[in-house]
């Protein structure tokens, strides 16, 4: 089972980089960052259960990761599930804001993914009341350049501004939700980060134990 878990870790986040040692301050920041992801994931209505949280550096840039595993196989994602995903992705950045009063570069990938989800909701999935059940922007795959995609803008500048406003609104909503959750659970956030800082890898059951929820 340990080998199986190790294989999953390598696929998701890359090989361990034990030589990439974090100093004590960085390690503590990463511990709070990942704890923020984990607590928001365990709190939002549609969050998939946390399976593992790690602050062992892996791959090219990953300093830590929070692994969630689905309860059952799914083929569709609802609007509420997308909104919860955005809040989860912003949980790490919000934890840094609350604890350290300043953010770091560690949230870059989280912000890219959250912004991508929000933009897809608005422009591709018709999940914006202001823009309606339409798609915006025509996507084409340029075969002669391999799998590179080109997006043709087929809307006005006014629509482009509204798209940007709606994307920003979705991301800000996720930020506010994550802030509310982690501010209200500050003692739990501290306890989880302390445990993660000490052990470096914790299981989903340990996360639930800190939160005070029944384990699987």
Image (cartoon, helix red, strand yellow):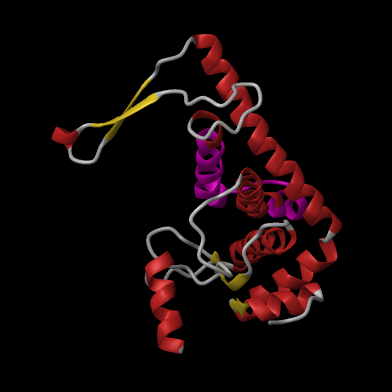
Lateral position of residue 143 relative to residue 163, left or right: left
**Residue 131: which quarter of the image?**
top right
Task: Please tell me whether residue 98 belongs to the stretch shown in magenta.
Answer: yes
Single out the residue that lies furthest toward the bottom.
1
Indicate the quadrant containing the C terminus: top left, top right, bottom left or bottom right: bottom right
Q: In this view, does 141 lie above or below 1?
A: above
Magenta portion: prevailing SS class: helix
Q: x, y percentage for residue 161?
A: 56, 16
Total marks drawn? Answer: 0
Depth check: 20 or 145 in front?
145
Lateral position of residue 151 relative to residue 187, left or right: left
Residue at point 62% right, 27% down? Answer: 166
Depth check: 194 or 146 in front?
146
Q: x, y percentage for residue 53?
A: 59, 71
Depth check: 102 or 52 in front?
52
Residue at point 52% right, 51% down? Answer: 76
**Residue 197: which quarter of the image?**
bottom right
Task: Please tell me whether residue 148 belongs to the stretch shown in magenta.
Answer: no
Q: x, y percentage for residue 51?
A: 59, 74
Residue 16: tell me if it is visible. no
Residue at point 64% right, 66% down? Answer: 31
Q: Is residue 21 above or below residue 147?
A: below
Q: Is residue 137 above or below residue 177?
A: above
Q: In this view, does 50 lie above or below 139?
A: below
Residue 171: tell me if it is visible. yes
Residue at point 75% right, 46% down? Answer: 177
Lateral position of residue 51 relative to residue 6, left or right: right
Q: In this picture, which residue range is highlighted in magenta?
A: 95-120
Q: x, y percentage for residue 45?
A: 73, 57
Lateral position of residue 157 relative to residue 183, left or right: left
């Amino acid at each position: 089972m340990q080998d199986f878990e190790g294989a999953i870790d390598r696929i998701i986040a890359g090989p361990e980089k034990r030589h990439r040692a974090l100093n004590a301050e960085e390690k503590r920041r990463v511990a709070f960052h990942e704890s923020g992801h984990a607590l928001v994931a365990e709190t939002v209505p549609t969050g998939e259960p946390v399976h593992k949280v790690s602050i062992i550096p892996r791959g090219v840039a990953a300093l830590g990761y929070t692994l969630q595993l689905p309860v059952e196989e799914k083929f569709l994602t609802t609007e509420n599930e997308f909104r919860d995903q955005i809040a989860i992705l912003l949980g790490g950045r919000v934890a840094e804001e609350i604890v350290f009063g300043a953010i770091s570069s560690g949230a870059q990938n989280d912000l890219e993914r959250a912004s991508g989800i929000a933009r897809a909701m608005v422009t591709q999935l018709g999940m914006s009341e202001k823009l309606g059940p339409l798609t915006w922007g025509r996507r084409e795959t340029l075969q002669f350049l391999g799998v590179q995609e080109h997006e043709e803008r087929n809307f006005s500048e006014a629509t482009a501004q509204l798209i940007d406003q709606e994307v920003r609104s979705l991301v800000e909503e996720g930020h506010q939700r994550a802030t509310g959750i982690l501010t209200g659970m500050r003692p739990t956030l501290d306890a989880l980060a302390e445990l993660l800082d000490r052990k470096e890898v914790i299981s989903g059951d340990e996360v639930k134990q800190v939160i005070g929820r029944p384990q699987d």
